[in-house]
Each structure stands twice: as C-alpha cells, then as structure tokens.
Image (spheres, rainbow, N blue to C red):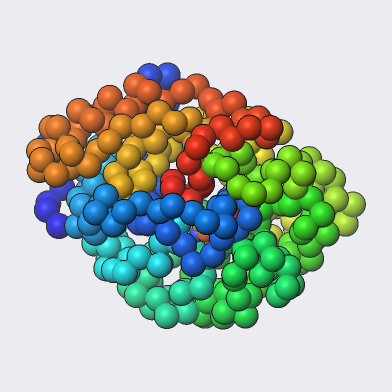
C-alpha cells in the first residue's frame, strides 16, 4: 500500500455541513445466504469484471483515510465470502494509528471460525454478526439456507479470540418478534451487544415487507415490560439510539429508520463492490469512483468524491409500500 499523503487533504463535508468520517466498504455483493428481508431468492450479482480488485479497495481506503475518515467497516453481501477478504483487511488495518481509528466488520458468521485469527491479526477488534433467530428451523427459514450451528460456531470462535461482538437482529413481525427478549438475555449471558433493526424497503423481494414490519417502539415496550432500560448518550452518528439494560449488562441499539429519523447527524457513506459511492442508503444517487481510481490520480479520485458529497440528501424517505431503491441492502452492506 502507498504511503498516506502527508499533505493535508481536505476533510469531507457534505452540502449540509455534515462531517463524513465513516465509510462502509462492500467487498462483494454476493452471499451464501438469502435472508428474506434482504434478498430475493434469485439474485443477479455483479459480473466479476465489474468488481473492484482487493488492491483497488485498499487504495480507496487509503484515500478516504487521507480525507479524514477515521472508521471503516467491511461489509457486503457477505464480506468473508470474498476470497482474500482477510488480506484486504490486513492492508486496511495497516492504516490504524495512521489516521484510521478503527476497522470493523459485519458478517453472517458462516466463515468466521476459519477467519477469526486472521481478522484479529488485521487489527479488527469489533464484529457485528447478523442473527435473526436462535431456533434452527426459523433461522433456516429466514435465511433460506443458513445453518444455525455453523453460525453459532463462528460467533463462539470470535468470542474466544477476544472480539467485542454485537448481534444485529432484524425485527420481523410473526417471525422473530417473540425472540427479542430471549435474544437480549442470550446476548447478556455472553457479553454481547444487541442491535434491533427495522426492516427497510430496499430492493424487490418476494415477501411484502409491510406484512413483516415490526416497529421498534413495540419492541422497546416489550423489553420494558421485563427490564429497565436506561437511555445512553452513546452515538455512532448513525440511525441507532442506545440503551443500557443494567440487569443483563447489555447495550441495546434500536435502529429505527422508519419510526424515528436521525439523518441530521448522519456521518457515513457507502461504497459498493463495483466502486459506486452511495451517499444515502435510501437514495439511488451515486458517483462511480472506479474510473477515477483506475486512473491512479488522487486528484481525480478526490474530485469524484467531492462531487458525490454534494449529492448527499438531507434524509431518506422510506415508505414500506414501495422499495426506496432498486438495489438491495446487500449492495451497500447496511
Ligand atoms: N452479510 C452480512 C450480514 O448479514 O451481517 C453483512 C451485510 S448485511 C446486508 C448487513 C446488515 O443489513 C445485516 O445485519 C442485515 O440483517 C441487514 N439488512 C439486510 N437487508 C435489510 C433490510 N432490507 N432492512 C433492514 N436491515 C437489513
Ligand atoms: Fe446475506 Fe447479510 Fe443479506 Fe443475509 S443480510 S442475505 S447474510 S447480505
């Protein structure tokens, strides 16, 4: 990887003055699962020729860090389904302490056991794992092909290695809403955090998302019937609001883009595996960084990034009756 320019490059602000210091990089749009709220059963994935090479992804990370990005999350699709994912994590992890404060990962954990050591050596210390049910049959139903035992094995391996783990659970009415309190306890027993997520209307799927929508206001009320929730001031500049559950020692995140909008403090942008820079999860606007990246000219890349920053909208306008975007969440990784 090239040296980070010592020349002070301009920090990134969008047209509304929001400082952008957090980037999510998708390593692939492919996945070994087909979660019903995320993907259709039959998906058309990017041709491999359009996907950025691992070197290009690392180069992009380097440029973002030079532009003031302090946190990078690797995501997908399933990031660990990309061959060389751990190598690119090592490359990007080399920026920690040189502008980058933290490198994190979001994964479905199917390959976490085999990669836990490599990811640790890359400098990753916090991992978010998707887990929507602790019941093997339900888990298979929601993911269409997931093997719960394997996922739990991956989570356990990461825990044993010392990673801080947060579970991401999409709340689905009639599917797993009755597991919210048990999941909270399960996380408490293991020292994990839990983030509950409202299903978002991104991309066409077979199910009607409105049928499965479970407002987190209800989830919160459900939890509060059993446990005290203490409001936390913790913020990641994202859509989550945090609560402590003192009885269980769990930090609970509620990601409720439908029932509560927190776009005012949004600090993040997302790059697809093909190098499109998306400014908002809920909008199609994007700038293609691939050509600029391939030109090898930092100024051209900066110019493309600056053009994108001006496109960042004030907020998303999710409406469950119609997908906000044609692309699925798996293109930009949440
Ligand atoms: N494959 C990895 C995983 O599942 O953790 C990383 C990518 S996945 C797209 C990132 C997160 O987005 C997961 O926690 C998943 O549950 C969530 N997600 C996917 N589609 C969603 C949707 N339509 N609404 C809300 N969350 C969604
Ligand atoms: Fe794959 Fe993650 Fe989407 Fe599930 S949520 S289909 S694991 S990308």
Residue 206 at x, y = what percent?
Answer: 64, 49
- In the displayed structure image, the side of residue 254 where residue 70 appears, left or right: left
Q: Looking at the rendering, which quadrant does residue 256 occupy?
A: top right
Against 252, is 325 above or below?
above
Q: Closest to the observer: 177 or 212? A: 212
The N terminus is located in which quarter? Answer: bottom left
Q: Looking at the rendering, which quadrant does residue 169 occupy?
A: bottom right
Question: What residue occupies the far right of the structure in this picture?
Answer: 225
Against 120, is 240 above or below?
above
Q: How many numbered discs?
A: 0
Q: Identify which residue is drawn at 77% across, 59% down.
A: 176
Q: Identify which residue is drawn at 63% across, 75% down.
A: 148
- In the displayed structure image, the side of residue 277 where residue 192 appears, left or right: right
Residue 14 at x, y = what percent?
Answer: 37, 24
Residue 235 at x, y = what percent?
Answer: 56, 41
Q: Identify which residue is drawn at 42% across, 19% down.
A: 16
Q: Identify which residue is drawn at 45% across, 56% down.
A: 77
- In the displayed structure image, the side of residue 220 where residue 273 appears, left or right: left
Against 116, is 280 above or below?
above
Is residue 247 visible to the viewer in this orientation of the structure?
no
């Amino acid at each position: 990887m090239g040296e980070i320019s010592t020349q002070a490059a301009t920090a990134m602000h969008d047209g509304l003055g929001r400082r952008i210091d957090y980037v999510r990089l998708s390593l692939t749009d492919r996945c070994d699962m087909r979660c019903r709220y995320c993907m259709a059963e039959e998906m058309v994935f990017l041709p491999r020729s359009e996907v950025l090479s691992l070197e290009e992804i690392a180069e992009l990370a380097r440029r973002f860090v030079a532009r003031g990005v302090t946190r990078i999350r690797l995501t997908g699709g399933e990031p660990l389904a990309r061959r060389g994912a751990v190598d690119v994590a090592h490359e990007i992890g080399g920026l920690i302490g040189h502008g980058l404060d933290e490198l994190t990962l979001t994964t479905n954990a199917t390959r976490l056991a085999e990669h836990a050591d490599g990811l640790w050596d890359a400098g990753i210390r916090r991992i978010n794992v998707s887990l929507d049910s602790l019941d093997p049959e339900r888990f298979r139903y929601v993911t269409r092909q997931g093997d719960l035992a394997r996922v739990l094995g991956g989570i356990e391996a990461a825990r044993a290695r010392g990673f801080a783990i947060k579970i991401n659970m999409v709340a689905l009415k009639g599917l797993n809403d009755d597991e919210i309190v048990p999941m909270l306890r399960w996380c408490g027993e293991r020292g994990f955090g839990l983030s509950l997520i409202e299903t978002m209307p991104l991309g066409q799927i077979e199910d009607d998302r409105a049928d499965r929508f479970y407002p987190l206001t209800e989830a919160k009320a459900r939890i509060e019937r059993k446990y005290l929730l203490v409001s936390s001031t913790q913020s990641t500049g994202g859509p989550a609001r945090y609560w402590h559950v003192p009885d269980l020692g769990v930090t609970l995140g509620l990601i409720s883009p439908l029932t509560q909008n927190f776009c005012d403090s949004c600090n993040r942008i997302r790059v697809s595996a093909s190098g499109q820079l998306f400014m908002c999860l809920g909008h199609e606007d994007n700038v293609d960084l691939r050509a600029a990246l391939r030109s090898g000219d930092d100024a051209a890349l900066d110019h493309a990034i600056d053009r994108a920053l001006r496109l960042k909208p004030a907020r998303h306008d999710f409406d469950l009756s119609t997908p906000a975007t044609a692309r699925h969440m798996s293109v930009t990784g949440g």
